[in-house]
Image (cartoon, rainbow, N blue to C red):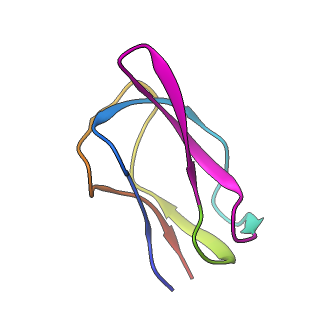
Amino acid sequence: MPDVEAHITGTVWKIEVSVGDEIAEGDTVVILESMKMEMPVEAEDEGIVKEIRCAEGQAVSEGDTLVVLE
């Protein structure tokens, strides 16, 4: 399963999932804030959240892994 990565550089505004959650393709897993805009980061595949590699308020770069799926 592919990991969910940041598609823009920004700050993690809100984490929408917890470890163990089942998610479907297209579900919002994290919301990033960039240039005062909220940008949802959606899962490209279904799976179960194995690990969350970010925290609310953390700065992330484009391509950083935010959530690991299994």
**In the image, is residue 52 above or below residue 12?**
below
Of residue 37 and residue 2, the one placed in the foreground of this image is 37
Q: Is 41 covered by the magenta stretch? A: yes
Question: Quarter-wise, where is residue 16 in the image?
Answer: top right
Residue 50 in the image: state x and y as whole percent: 55, 71
Residue 9 in the image: state x and y as whole percent: 27, 38
Residue at 39 percent of width and 54 percent of height: 53
Span of residues in magenta: 24-42
Q: Is residue 56 left or right of residue 48?
A: left
Give the tally of numbered discs. Answer: 0
Q: Is 43 covered by the magenta stretch? A: no
Main secondary structure type of the part rendered in magenta: strand
Q: Is residue 1 left or right of residue 19?
A: left
Where the C terminus falls, by quadrant? Answer: bottom right
Question: Quarter-wise, where is residue 48 in the image?
Answer: bottom right
Residue 22 in the image: state x and y as whole percent: 76, 69
**In the image, is residue 45 above or below residue 4?**
below
> Of all residues shown, which one is farthest toward the top?
36
Residue at 75 percent of width and 70 percent of height: 24
**In the image, is residue 57 above or below residue 60?**
above
Residue 56 in the image: state x and y as whole percent: 46, 30
**In the image, is residue 30 above or below residue 50?**
above
Of residue 67 and residue 51, the one placed in the foreground of this image is 67
Of residue 55 and residue 8, the one placed in the foreground of this image is 8
Residue at 40 percent of width and 45 percent of height: 54
